[in-house]
Amino acid sequence: MDKNEVVAGLAGDLYAAEAAVDEAIVKATTLVQAMIAARTELSVAATVGAGAQAKAMESLAALGQAREAVTAAHTEMAKDHRRMGWGVYAAGPVNKPPEDGRPIEVRDHLRVA
């Protein structure tokens, strides 16, 4: 494989990992919501299932930390890519925030720079 194929494969794996963590967060959030809805529907006390719900919420917090870690890895990989003189590789979402933390401005048209 040439350099571009390796970089493209790695970028694809990175975006897949980010998407998997996001999907896990969605599913864990849905679980907590379903637990609360089920308890309400069954008219049981808030103390019923409180331990399980607390553990589900702990898993959600851990997934938040996992998301921070995978996005930090993304940032470090991008820095390494540029340090090696390989320029910018864009394979994922286009509307990424600038590295200085400023919010992005989304436009519906292209401009000539």
Image (cartoon, grey):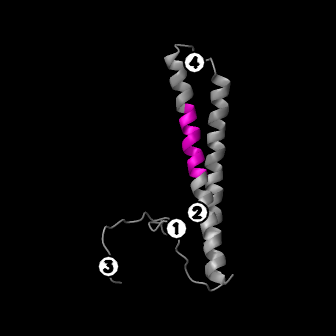
Using the numbered discs, state the Cα–Cα distance from disc 2 to disc 4 in whole angstroms: 39 Å
Which residue was labeled with disc 4?
A: 46
Q: Residue at x 48, y 69 (%)?
A: 98
Please, what secondary structure does the residue beneath circle 1 have? Answer: loop
Which residue was labeled with disc 2?
A: 15
First in sequence: mark 4 or mark 1? Answer: 4
Using the numbered discs, state the Cα–Cα distance from disc 2 to disc 3 in whole angstroms: 27 Å
Query: Few, some or many C-alpha atoms within 10 Å of disc 4 (few <14, some 14-19, many ≥20)?
Result: few
Percent x, y for residue 25?
58, 45
Quarter assignment of residue 81: bottom right
Using the numbered discs, state the Cα–Cα distance from disc 1 to disc 3 in whole angstroms: 20 Å
Image vertical order of residue 91 relative to residue 25, above or below: below
First in sequence: mark 2 or mark 4? Answer: 2
Mark 4 belongs to which amino acid? Ala
First in sequence: mark 2 or mark 3? Answer: 2
Which residue was labeled with disc 3?
A: 111
Residue 28 within the segment the image draws in magenta: yes
Q: Are marks 2 and 1 in contact (CB under 8 Å)?
A: yes
Quarter assignment of residue 32: top right
Which residue was labeled with disc 1?
A: 92
Percent x, y for residue 28?
59, 39
| Nearest-to-viewer mark from 1 and 3 | 1
